Amino acid sequence: MLENTVVFGLVALCAAYSLWAFLPVALKRSTATVLVNSGLPLGIFAARVNKLIAQDTGCGSGCGSCSSSSAPVEKPVVWHYKK
């Protein structure tokens, strides 16, 4: 019984982590705001959550490329044929 509970807990934590990893930044930010406003003790995650809320990435994708003012450089496609 204890083994099942431990395995269930690990699987639930892994599922929550993978869900968090694949969420778009806009959803992460809104979820983090709800967590902070709920009053739950965040413990060691408080600094990461506050950093996420404080980010300003423009469109919310999290890539940080909005701040660069240069246009993307076009590179030619080179085909390498096997002999």
Image: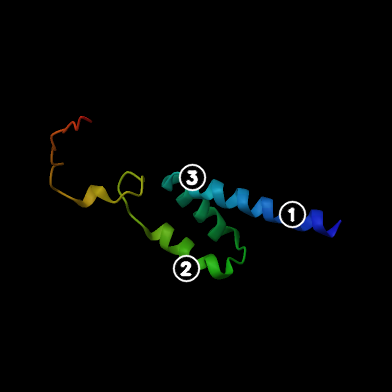
Label 1 and label 3: CA atoms lie apart by 23 Å
Is 47 positioned to the left or the right of 73 in the image? right
Give coordinates of residue 32: x percent, y percent.
51, 55
Q: How busy is the neighbourhood of tag 1: few (under 14 within 10 Å), some, or many (20 plus)?
A: few
- Is 26 located above or below residue 43 in the figure? above
**Residue that badge 3 annotates:** 22
**Quadrant housing the N terminus:** bottom right
Amino acid tagged 1: Val
Q: Which residue occupies the extreme front position in the image?
A: 83
**Residue that badge 2 annotates:** 47
Amino acid tagged 3: Phe
Looking at the picture, tell me which residue is in the foreground, 6 or 62.
6
Q: Between disc 2 and disc 3, whose residue precedes?
A: 3
**Residue that badge 1 annotates:** 7
Looking at the picture, tell me which residue is in the foreground, 18 or 48.
18
Q: Between disc 2 and disc 1, whose residue precedes?
A: 1
Judged by depth in the image, the label closer to the viewer, 1 or 3, is: 1
**Quadrant housing the C terminus:** top left
